Amino acid sequence: MADDDEAEEAEPAVELGEGPAVEGAPLARVASRLTWPQEKSRVLDKEGEAVIRTPDGPRELADVLSNVEDTYFDRRQTFVDAVEDVIGRGPVQTAE
């Protein structure tokens, strides 16, 4: 059994492609680093300098949140929805 476990760990579960790089972190990754509920000011203190992926290219989270009127996010999805309302939803640009 140990040999089977080692063989499974040696190969990645998903093959990674060699396509163009995408700058910035996924919004979901940034949101997962926080606990909820969270005030907007605390999000800025903790993750304001994070660069997130957007359909228009990478943007600093602090810049995006300056366009969000909410000052309190009761749950993760509320935060994600508020940010996506500003940045849009859709595929992100790749680095050229």
Image (cartoon, rainbow, N blue to C red):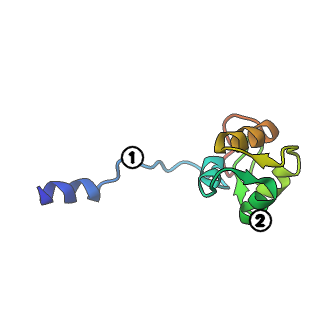
Determine which quarter of the picture holds residue 88: top right
x and y, in percent, of residue 56 in the image: 78, 43
In the rendered structure, find residue 45 and report the number of the disc placed on it.
2
**Amino acid beneath label 2:** Asp
Name the foreground residue: 38 vs 7: 38
What residue lies at 69% left-to-right and 49% top-to-bottom? 53
What residue lies at 64% left-to-right and 56% top-to-bottom? 34
In the rendered structure, find residue 83 and report the number of the disc placed on it.
none
Name the foreground residue: 21 vs 84: 84
Name which of mark 1 and mark 2 comes first in the sequence: 1
Q: Is residue 57 above or below residue 43?
A: above
Determine which quarter of the picture holds residue 70: top right
x and y, in percent, of residue 41 in the image: 81, 59
Answer left or right for 45 relative to 23.
right
What residue lies at 65% left-to-right and 45% top-to-bottom? 76
**Element assignment for label 1:** loop
Q: Is residue 2 above or below residue 27?
A: below
In the rendered structure, find residue 14 and report the number of the disc placed on it.
1
**Amino acid beneath label 1:** Val
- The 10 Å Cα crowd at callout 1, few under 14, some 14 to 19, many 20 or more, is few
Disc count in the image? Answer: 2
Answer left or right for 72 relative to 90.
right
